[in-house]
């Protein structure tokens, strides 16, 4: 359910209010019952769902959505749009419990609502986000963040890092691994058998032969060459300002970006309400909407559920293909 103080419960309630969405799968929600009930009533939804305590038996076949009420948040002092350690702790517990359902083979895929980075950090959470935490829980070494929407699909070489740390975080080995992971997941989960990958440069004009930085020559280009030698259809490093137009025109299936905003700005510009975040490399499918907790509108019943609905549809189609 994401941060209880954000829009997670609302977008879940609105997405599941669509009968076409509910037909796609059997849904289990991990969160706080009173928070979801508030969102459910505010959104004027009318589907049936069951509320159960944790550790109760799970039988979802032929049933309505189930909500496991973890009772992590006190309803008396609850506030929307508020950064609190207890809300961060609750959000992390929702993720952990969802993972346990998958580990126990009670669920097949995970769709996560947004968490607030500051709230979870104040609760002692030492990971950059869902991607890194799920990598830790599953003991998965090689993971990557993919976002897709409209005609663009991007994968990030680095995730939630300050810009000043990006350049020194890049290395040939990791970029090569992410390229291999991207190619494999495009084939296995999206049915793209000859994936065309374009790689963004880090620096303007792809470094101008070293005049604006040497990361392209020393790190990115060698990783691309190793991938090409492995039979992957890949090119670059290209100047980012040119590459995105080529991908938008259909010349590439995926763009590998060197840092977070390099990929997300163009993606959200053209597909803000349909973009989906996907974690590559995990032993199960995990998706999420491509937006945050939206504390500024939490509790107002004005959140758009389209990205969350797209995340559900993507999780279902990927799991079915898998």
Image: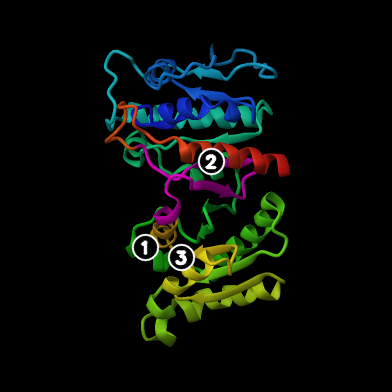
**Residue under the point 55% across and 66% down:** 175
Camera-nearest residue between 220 and 198: 198
Taking the image as drawn, is residue 163 in sight?
A: yes
Mark 2: few, some, or many residues within 10 Å (few <14, many ≥20)? many
Q: CA distance from mark 1 to mark 2?
A: 32 Å
Question: Which of labels 2 and 3 is toward the front?
Answer: 2
Taking the image as drawn, is residue 322 in sight?
A: no
Q: Secondary structure at mark 1?
A: helix
Q: Secondary structure at mark 2?
A: helix
Camera-nearest residue between 129 and 247: 247
Question: Which of labels 1 and 2 is toward the front?
Answer: 2
Q: Which residues are magenta?
A: 268-293
Residue 149 placement (x, y as % from top left): 51, 51
Camera-nearest residue between 114 and 267: 267
Residue 273 placement (x, y as % from top left): 44, 44
**Residue under the point 66% across and 61% down:** 183
Mark 3: few, some, or many residues within 10 Å (few <14, many ≥20)? many
Marker disc for residue 258: 3
Colour setting: rainbow
Q: CA distance from mark 2 to mark 3?
A: 25 Å
Name the N-terminal-most of marks 3 and 1.
Answer: 1
Q: Which residue is mark 1?
A: 165
């Amino acid at each position: 359910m994401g941060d209880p103080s954000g829009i997670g419960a609302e977008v879940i309630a609105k997405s599941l209010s669509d009968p076409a969405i509910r037909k796609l799968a059997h849904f289990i929600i991990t969160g706080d019952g009173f928070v979801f009930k508030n969102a459910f009533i505010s959104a004027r939804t009318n589907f049936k769902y069951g509320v159960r305590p944790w550790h109760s038996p799970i039988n979802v076949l032929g049933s309505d959505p189930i909500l496991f009420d973890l009772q992590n948040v006190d309803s008396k002092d609850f506030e929307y749009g508020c950064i609190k350690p207890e809300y961060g702790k609750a959000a992390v517990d929702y993720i952990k419990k969802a993972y346990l359902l998958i580990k126990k083979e009670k669920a097949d895929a995970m769709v996560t609502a947004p968490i607030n980075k500051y709230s979870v950090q104040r609760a002692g959470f030492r990971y950059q986000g869902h991607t890194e935490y799920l990598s830790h829980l599953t003991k998965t070494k090689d993971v990557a963040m993919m976002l897709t929407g409209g005609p663009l699909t991007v994968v990030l070489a680095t995730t939630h890092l300050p810009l000043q740390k990006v350049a020194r975080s890049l290395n040939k080995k990791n970029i090569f691994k992410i390229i291999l992971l991207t190619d494999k997941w495009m084939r296995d989960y999206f049915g793209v058998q000859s994936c065309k990958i374009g790689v963004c440069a880090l620096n303007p004009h792809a470094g101008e032969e070293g005049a604006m930085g040497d990361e392209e020559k020393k790190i990115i280009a060698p990783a691309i060459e190793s991938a090409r030698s492995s039979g992957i259809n890949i090119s670059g490093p290209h100047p980012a300002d040119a590459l995105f137009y080529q991908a938008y025109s259909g010349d590439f299936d995926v763009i590998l970006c060197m840092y977070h905003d390099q990929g997300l700005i163009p993606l959200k510009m053209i597909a803000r309400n349909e973009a989906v975040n996907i974690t590559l490399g995990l032993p199960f499918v995990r998706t999420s909407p491509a937006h945050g907790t939206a504390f500024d509108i939490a509790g107002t019943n004005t959140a758009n559920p389209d990205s969350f609905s797209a995340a559900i549809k993507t999780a279902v189609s990927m799991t079915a293909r898998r």
